Image (spheres, rainbow, N blue to C red):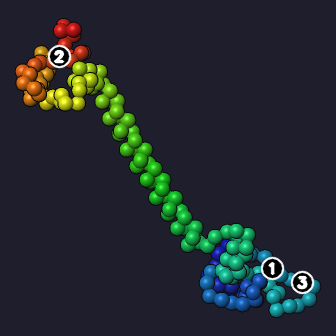
Amino acid sequence: MQQVNRPFQAPGVCFICEASPDGEWVDTQRFWEPNGYTHLNGRKYLCEGCITQAAKTIGHVERDVFEHACLVKDNALDRADALAIRLAQFENFADAVKRIEALFPKVVEAPVEYIPEVAAINTKEGTITIAKVPRGRPAKQVTPRGLNSAAE
């Protein structure tokens, strides 16, 4: 079978509805030649309308409905991919937070009212200067585990 723009051979009508409507056609590449002559003798063609009706009868959908469903599916897959990337970013962020918590256990475990601000980080000495300590406490230096092994 093949798609054609119009019937080329006799009888030049749809084998089902026996009409010649505008639209796409299917050439079945078969011939109808019963014992005796009828007005349908010749090549068997099927018009788009009859094919559509037959397809709907057995549960198939029209082309535009199918194409729309494909677009919706593609959009959903694209969004799922974007969400997977975003999730991976959050997982990486969570891992980083865990590593930071391991380095600064006292800061992380501090009460909510004690939220220090980092004033300076000295990577050579492995110290962090915390400023604006609440309740009149002086600024102090904290040496995180792992930065200065000699201080541990």
Give the quarter of the image for residue 57: bottom right
**The label number, if any, that marks residue 31 in the structure image:** 1
Horizontal relation, residue 88 to residue 108: left or right:
right
Residue, disc 2: 143
Q: Nearer the viewer, residue 109 or 104?
A: 109
Q: Which residue is drawn at 61% across and 73% down?
A: 62
Q: Quick check: can you spot residue 10?
A: no
Q: Which residue appears farthest toward the right when viewing the image?
A: 35
Mark 1–mark 2 Cα distance, whole angstroms, equals 92 Å
Residue, disc 3: 34
Total labels: the figure holds 3
Q: As shown in the figure, which amino acid type bears the numbered disc 1?
A: Phe
Q: Which of 87 and 108 is in front in this view?
A: 108
Q: Residue at x 66, y 89 (%)?
A: 21
Q: Nearer the viewer, residue 6 or 78?
A: 78
Q: Which residue is drawn at 11% across and 28% down?
A: 134
Give the quarter of the image for residue 87: top left
Badge 3 marks a residue whose secondary structure is: loop
